[in-house]
Amino acid sequence: MYEKYVKILKDHTLKITSPRLEVLKYLDEHHTHPNVEEIYSSLKKTHPSLSRTTVYNSLEILKKNRIVQSLAISGSELRYDIDERLHHHFICNRCGAILDISIACPNMDKTLQGGHRVEEVQGYFKGICKKCQTKEKGRSNNG
Amino acid sequence: MYEKYVKILKDHTLKITSPRLEVLKYLDEHHTHPNVEEIYSSLKKTHPSLSRTTVYNSLEILKKNRIVQSLAISGSELRYDIDERLHHHFICNRCGAILDISIACPNMDKTLQGGHRVEEVQGYFKGICKKCQTKEKGRSNNG
DNA sequence: GTGGCTGCAAATCATTTGCATATAC
DNA sequence: GTATATGCAAATGATTTGCAGCCAC
């Protein structure tokens, strides 16, 4: 059940603790780009002693080890994602859904014109998702 | 002196107020991607009655009118920029500088694979800027 | 004249910090 | 056994809100 996550932590020489395994499992099973509150309140149900601080701590160390990445796309709070390289994100300005975008952006992991070394690229696409467009058509074009 | 900014506001049928003109002028003259505090404390010197709230309000309405854009690139606070379309940003993880990147990312202003309508694209490139790389070489490769 | 804007103080909300206890190795 | 992680409560810091007075149009 947890071997997969144990392995990930071991591979990065991180201590194996319950909160880290749970956070990792949660992100692996929910590719919805949850914020801290969502992760916390969900895990709290089965692990009542869990604290928000620990969720923050766990995410922080997973992030430092490039196991997860944080997204500032929503504006108000950070959202988290298992860090599979080379994908970007779309946020719907209507419903707030955050979707993975698999187009490759050129110039990743390169040195830019000015000589700046790029270590990470995040592409944030904002607009109206398919679903919300359909809804709009449905009720003509008012509101 | 302010005609340029008056025109911008008029073109968007916004009321011409001193805070709006000053914020606009500040961003036009400082392409450093300042945060609210920087804008506020700078303008406060010459306009002592200015309030932080008004800076927030002004930026908000300028943003709604697509005259400025906000960047969530720094993590902790929003940074602002005169909104010239089609440019992206690089942040140096060492010194925190935010630089304009002029490469064009494909797939802007298009409909993505999933049928999502894109209205805005922000590319955040993170790494080590030229200057900081030079500094590092200077002192060998420790610390 | 009036609706929208400004500016103040208080509230909110995500995140961080300090610290005592617990636990992985 | 010890360094590190957890969990609690309090602190911080950016941003928002409520509201009274003011000003652009």
Image (spheres, coloured by chain):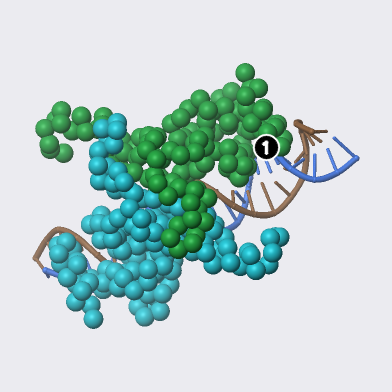
Chain colours: A cyan, B green, C blue, D brown
Whether residue B57 is visible = no
Please state, as top left, top right, bottom left or bottom right, where the N terminus of chain A lies in the image.
bottom left
Q: Point out residue B118 in the picture as x, y percentages from the top left corner.
A: 50, 53
Judge left or right: residue B73 versus residue B19: left
- Nearest the eye: C4 or A98: A98
Please state, as top left, top right, bottom left or bottom right, where the C terminus of chain A lies in the image.
bottom right
Q: Quadrant of residue A26?
A: bottom left
Q: Residue at x 60, y 39 (%)?
A: B62
Q: Is A27 above or below relative to A119?
A: below
Judge left or right: residue C15 versus residue B27: left
Q: Amino acid at mark 1?
A: His
Whether residue B133 is visible = yes
Q: Point out residue B99 in the picture as x, y percentages from the top left corner.
A: 37, 34
Q: Is C9 above or below relative to A137?
A: above
Q: Residue at x 34, y 49 (%)?
A: A105
- Nearest the eye: A86 or B38: A86
Judge left or right: residue B87 versus residue B20: left
Q: Residue at x 31, y 63 (%)?
A: A82
Mark 1 element type: loop
Residue under label 1, please give it: B12
